[in-house]
């Protein structure tokens, strides 16, 4: 990425904002525990002239900057870390045992803060800027908690946008996708109730381990035979727990499933067929099934108009050569989906690097690429100024 694409005002802040990112990285906090992070974010925003609201969604922060009577735009960054032991060996590596920023949320937060400072200094827009620093994105429902606390009622937005780094794409290249972009994610816990017994006389028991084994194989037929091959559907059996001795048939066994889809219709189909199949399989062995179906994240659906606008801003600024043209939907999930159910907007990506040494997200050796920060911040400034034209 050409350094000339970085706005001069962002370039002047670059070293300071990267140092801030390194500080966030060294002091990671898990979901709904981002007390020091949110306090620092709030202090930065207040010092730059934002009206700051804290405790939104427990540890979330919203910074509001008004300049004129135009429309309102929201930008969101996530703040939480993951329960992973860092192995990078970096000078600014995590100082918290068993916790690290393995998904780049430290970079997302610092990027948005850099844009915030520049926008507060220049105020080259007409309208209201809502900066949303979200807690607990990593599976704990931070976005939903902020919505329950009245996020969009208290801080209304005509459109809202979020950005995430993605390893494997060129540094600083931006990617946009209209429509279903991130998969839904549901967690299913299945308990099979059989009849325990001695391993030497299995005919006098109803073995729940055998039932689970049959269910694991049968579940794959849902994807291969009930779902259109052109649609995305994933059923992963992540764990099976049963028994504690080789010669004892346990009375029960449990399974945990991760279920993902890229359309609400397929998501519904999977729930219906999993429920039918598990109950049917259990009954066929003389066992009984208890199913706890937890709906975690909906499909993230980018709004066409907002996505087209966001892409056009990037295209005019960077040119086609710095856009990710082969971007496809991801089967990972993202709780920004809850916000997009309530407000038009789009979730975009920025390349974190495509070299052989690049490390995937949620890996103990991962680190956010600092070269992304000034490009991401410059893009946020461009997007705000384009959306809130004077």
Image: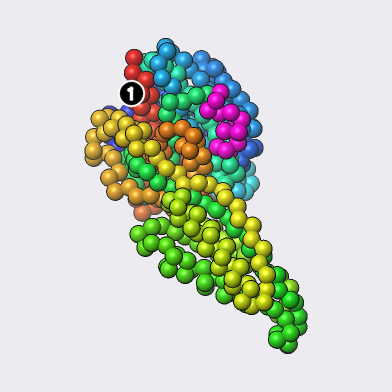
* Residue drawn at x 47%, y 60% as measured from the top left: 234
Q: Quadrant of residue 202?
A: bottom right
* Residue drawn at x 44%, y 65% as measured from the top left: 226
Q: Looking at the rendering, in which quadrant would you find the C terminus?
A: top left
Q: Foreground residue, 273 or 84?
A: 273
Measured as percent of width and height from the top left, residue 102 is found at 51, 46
* Residue drawn at x 61%, y 25% as measured from the top left: 54
Q: What residue did someone put label 1 on?
A: 386
**Main secondary structure type of the part rendered in magenta:** helix
- Residue 147 within the magenta-colored segment of the rendering: yes
Measured as percent of width and height from the top left, residue 129 is found at 45, 21
Name the side, left or right, on which 83 lies relative to 110. right
Q: Foreground residue, 116 or 359?
A: 116
Q: Looking at the rendering, in which quadrant would you find the N terminus?
A: top left
Q: Residues within 10 Å of mark 1 (few under 14, many from 20)?
A: some
Read off the magenta span. 142-154
Measured as percent of width and height from the top left, residue 4 is found at 27, 29
Measured as percent of width and height from the top left, residue 279 is found at 61, 68
């Amino acid at each position: 990425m050409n350094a000339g694409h970085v706005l001069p005002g962002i370039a002047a802040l670059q070293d300071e904002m990267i140092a801030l990112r390194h500080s966030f990285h060294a002091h990671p906090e898990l979901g709904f525990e981002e007390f020091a992070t949110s306090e620092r974010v709030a202090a930065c925003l207040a010092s730059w002239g934002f009206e700051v609201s804290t405790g939104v969604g427990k540890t979330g922060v919203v910074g509001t900057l008004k300049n004129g009577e135009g429309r309102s735009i929201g930008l969101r960054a996530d703040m939480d870390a993951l329960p992973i032991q860092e192995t990078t060996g970096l000078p600014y590596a995590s100082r918290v045992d068993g916790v690290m920023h393995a998904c780049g949320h430290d970079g997302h937060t610092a990027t948005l803060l850099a844009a915030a400072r520049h926008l507060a200094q220049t105020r080259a827009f007409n309208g209201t800027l809502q900066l949303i620093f979200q807690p607990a994105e990593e599976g704990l429902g931070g976005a939903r908690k902020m919505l329950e606390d009245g996020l969009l009622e208290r801080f209304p937005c005509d459109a809202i946008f979020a950005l995430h780094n993605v390893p494997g794409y060129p540094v600083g290249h931006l990617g946009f996708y209209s429509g279903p972009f991130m998969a839904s994610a549901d967690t299913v816990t299945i308990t099979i109730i059989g009849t325990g017994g001695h391993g030497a006389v299995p005919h006098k028991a109803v073995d729940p381990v055998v039932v689970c084994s049959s269910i694991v194989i049968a579940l794959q037929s849902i994807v291969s035979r009930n779902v259109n091959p052109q649609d995305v559907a994933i059923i992963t059996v992540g764990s099976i727990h049963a028994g504690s001795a080789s010669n004892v048939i346990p009375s029960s066994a449990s399974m945990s499933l991760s279920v993902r889809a890229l359309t609400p219709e397929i998501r519904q189909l999977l729930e219906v067929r999993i429920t039918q199949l598990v109950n049917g399989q259990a009954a066929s062995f003389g066992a009984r099934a208890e199913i706890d179906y937890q709906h975690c994240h909906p499909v993230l659906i980018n709004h066409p108009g907002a996505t087209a606008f966001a892409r056009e801003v990037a295209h005019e600024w960077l040119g086609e050569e710095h856009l990710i043209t082969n971007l496809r939907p991801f089967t990972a999930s993202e709780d920004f989906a809850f916000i997009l159910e309530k407000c038009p907007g789009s979730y975009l990506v920025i390349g974190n690097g495509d070299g052989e040494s690049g490390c995937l997200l949620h890996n103990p050796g991962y680190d956010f690429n600092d070269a992304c920060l000034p490009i991401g911040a410059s893009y946020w400034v461009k997007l705000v100024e384009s959306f809130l034209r004077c």
